Amino acid sequence: MEVPPPLVLKRPLYVPSKTLMGPGPSNCSHRVLEAMSNPVLGHMHPECLQIMDEVKEGIKYIFQTLNDATMCISGAGHAGMEASLCNLIEDGDVVLLGVTGVWGHRAADMARRYGADVRYVEASFGRALSQEEIKFAFETHRPRVFFVAQGDSSTGIIQQNIRELGELCRQFDCFLVVDTVASLGGTEFLMDEWKVDVVYTGSQKSLGGPAGLTPISFSKRALTHIKQRKSKPKVYYFDILLIGQYWGCYGTPRIYHHTISSTLLYGLREALAHFCAVGLKAVVRRHQECSRRLQLGIEELGLEMFVQREEERLPTVNTIKVPFGVDWKKVAEYAMRKYSVEISGGLGPTVEHVFRIGLMGENATVERVDMVLSILHEAIQSIKLRAVKAERSKI
């Protein structure tokens, strides 16, 4: 038996142009797209290693850290979650997960696979965790590792007390892991000042880079713990001591660990260069101003934000309650079909309850906010009108 060449690959590649106003990825700038069209380099070529060093410096800036163990994991944001837990956890360690949406449960699934004794502290639906709730959970469970998402993209909730959590973790000799995949660039984050032990983020959201490389940083305290493990991390690919040698983090000769994508490096390098040129505070301010404009527009349309407390709303991924009697899928399909604009539905606990509108990177502009508000309103009205006509036709 001979398998023939697939006919589909005889057709030329076609990629439509879309405006990505969902929870990520966001649209890349022309600068980033052009960078990724450069020639491929070998993963150990000096020019590639130089770009890796430049990316490393950019990551230190966006995390506000001087940690030597700052690098990228080759993989999507989930790879950052895996690497954080894989390196810190040993069999039997108590790991406490802060849950404000889907990501606390996702991290718990991973932690169990690394042999952790998993515990939870869960927020009320649509709310952030209070410092009192978390402290009570610490006193009850005495965790070795505490995980929390600064911004949960499934619910649109922001956890504002990371600074206080850093202090709490030190009091309990616990390692603090913070997921900033959806929040970085939309709110303040100061890794060293807040005593965060591990942080990772997504390259494809507010940074405006391509998905596939995950910036991550480990504190000196976390690195010392990893070096003193009783056993090696359970996954070779996520072993931060080896990846860090490849990235030149420890002052030792570079080693081959895996074949990094040079084209993704180019894109991330240029996304970081733009981010740094604009400045961290200015980027955060722009994202927050766009979110406030969107929230005012939502109110004017007679719609309601899912997160009731303004101070607990994530600026980058905004969740809006789906009006009664409206099918969110039809609204999303209308926006895509007529305008090639992505508006997403919920995820995990918010499925069928919310629309999710992302304001990140290139899409965090006044013009994009006004555009998505107009399209959302038009789509909802169109779906409602169709529903009325359908009911009348039955009479």
Image: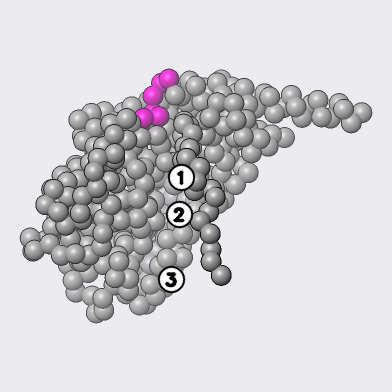
- In the rendered image, which quarter is residue 98 located in? bottom left
Residue receiving disc 3: 112
- Front position in the image: 32 or 288: 32
In the image, residue 26 lies at what x, y percent? 41, 37
Q: Is residue 198 visible?
A: no
Tell me which amino acid carries mark 1: Ser
Q: Are marks 1 and 3 in contact (CB under 8 Å)?
A: no
Which stretch did the figure color magenta? 361-367
- Front position in the image: 296 or 243: 243
Residue receiving disc 1: 153
Q: For the view shown, which residue lies furthest in the right direction?
A: 395
Q: Are marks 2 and 1 in contact (CB under 8 Å)?
A: yes
Q: Which mark is residue 103?
A: 2
Q: Earlier in the sequence, mark 3 or mark 2?
A: 2
Q: Is residue 98 visible?
A: yes
357 on left or right of 237: right
In the image, residue 283 lies at what x, y percent? 29, 31
